[in-house]
Image (tube, rainbow, N blue to C red):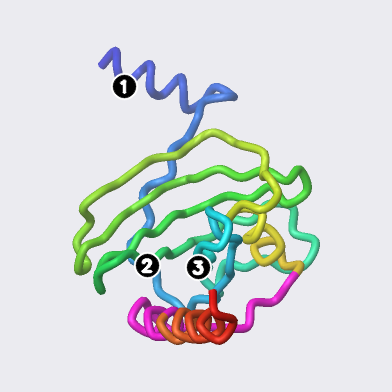
Amino acid sequence: MRIALVAGVCLLASGCATVDAPAPVPPAGPWRLTVSPPYDPGGQPGLIWLREADLGPAGVAINRHWEMSLRGEPGDEVFHRMEYDCRAGRVRRLEMVRLAHGVPVERGGAGDWSDIIPHTPPHAILAAACGETRLEKSAADAAAARDVEAALRAAWAAARAARGT
């Protein structure tokens, strides 16, 4: 009874934090590809997929969206539900779920706001999430995204080989 009373008072009081229920994962596509700078000079660029339905119109102040990152083995994907403050140039994670063959194997909760640093993955994502640029490459699901990534990596390897690097 006492716990219920305290919970009821908290819900009525201003300033009580609310917690969003975890969203269904994996979220449905289609997905759009954004490319971030490589972590190491001469390394591979980062490939991050943004859920098309979540991309904001130009001028949006806050954007919440799903990001998908593919890992080594087919069926190994990481989904992040992110929040971008388009005007202040900051980002925070709302939720993370890593799947192995459709089964959640790792979960993470919300993080704190952080400033977006130039030449980082969040910087590469900011313009697309906030509706300032349109992403051209698309995929209906993770399998199609893997095919797009394989084609891009093959083209990049061929270009490097042609340069002799």
Identity of the residue drawn at 36% across and 59% down:
78
Residue 40's disc is none
**Vertical arrangement, residue 68 with respect to residue 161, above or below:** above
Which structural element holds mark 2?
Answer: strand
Q: Which residues are magenta?
A: 133-149
Q: Residue furthest front?
A: 164
On the rendered image, what quadrant is the C terminus found in?
bottom right
Question: Comparing marks 3 and 1, which lies closer to the viewer?
Answer: 3
Q: Which residue corresponds to mark 3?
A: 47
Identity of the residue drawn at 70% across and 49% down:
118
Q: Amino acid at mark 1?
A: Ala
- Residue 1 lies in quadrant: top left
Residue 4's disc is 1
- Residue 24 lies in quadrant: bottom left
Q: List x then y, in percent, for residue 66.
A: 48, 61
Q: Amino acid at mark 2?
A: Leu
Which of the two labelled residues, at mark 1 and mark 2, occupies the earlier sequence position?
Answer: 1
> Considering depth in this image, is 54 or 154 the residue closer to the camera?
154
Distance CA(mark 1)–CA(mark 2): 43 Å
- Magenta stretch encompasses residue 138: yes
Q: Which residue corresponds to mark 2?
A: 70
**Disc 2 residue crowd, few under 14, some 14–19, many 20+, Cα 10 Å:** many
Distance CA(mark 3)–CA(mark 1): 47 Å
- The reply to whether dot 2 and dot 3 touch (C-beta < 8 Å) is yes
Question: Comparing marks 1 and 2, which lies closer to the viewer?
Answer: 2
Q: List x then y, in percent, for residue 145.
A: 42, 79
Side (left or right) of 58 relative to 21: right
